[in-house]
Image (cartoon, helix red, strand yellow):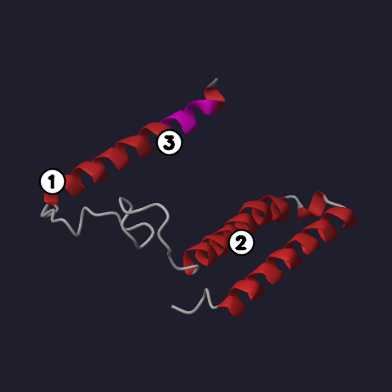
Amino acid sequence: MTEYFPVFIYIIFSTFLSLLILGLSFVFSVQKPDPEKVSAYECGFDPFDDARSRFDIKFYLVAILFIIFDLEVTFLFPWAVTLNQLDFFGFWTMIVFLFILTVGFFYEWRKGALDW
């Protein structure tokens, strides 16, 4: 149980620091809400409009781009940590995975998802 004591202290300290920073941001920030600030901004169009309305395909391309980079980081970090314990099959499996992600990245690039 004493092995977990530093982890417990770290969790308590980080929770306290997070709450302190969050509280200070409410105390010292200027709160001026207006309709434009409190409106939805996640996807670039009004969420309370007709569900069958058309919107730009770039939203899908940006989502695919996010998945490409998110998956790459999610799988690449544990692979890099255990690379010295893997054999050639584990190495080449990740190389094939990275190749597929690279093909997806070039597809996004050709479709113009990186052009803002």
Where does residue 22 sit, x and y in percent of width and height?
25, 44
Q: How far apart are the two marked residues, 1 and 2, measured between alpha carbons? A: 39 Å
Percent across and percent down for residue 101 are 69, 65
Question: What residue lies at 13% left-to-right and 51% top-to-bottom?
Answer: 28
Q: Does the magenta stretch include residue 5?
A: yes
Question: Which residue is outermost to the top?
Answer: 1
Name the amino acid, label 3. Answer: Tyr
| Residue toward you, 108 or 101 | 108
For badge 1, the amino acid type reads Val
**Location of residue 91 in the rendering, given as x and y in whole percent from the top left corner:** 82, 58
What residue does disc 3 label?
10
Q: Is residue 88 depicted above or below 57 in this figure?
A: above
Place residue 55 in its image quadrant. Answer: bottom left
Please state the total of marks drawn on the protein image: 3
Circle 2 residue: 68
Q: Name the residue under label 1.
A: 27
User: 39 or 48, which is in the foreground?
Assistant: 48
Instruction: Determine whether 11 is above or below 90 in the image.
Output: above
Q: Start and end of the magenta stretch? A: 4-10
Give SS at disc 3: helix
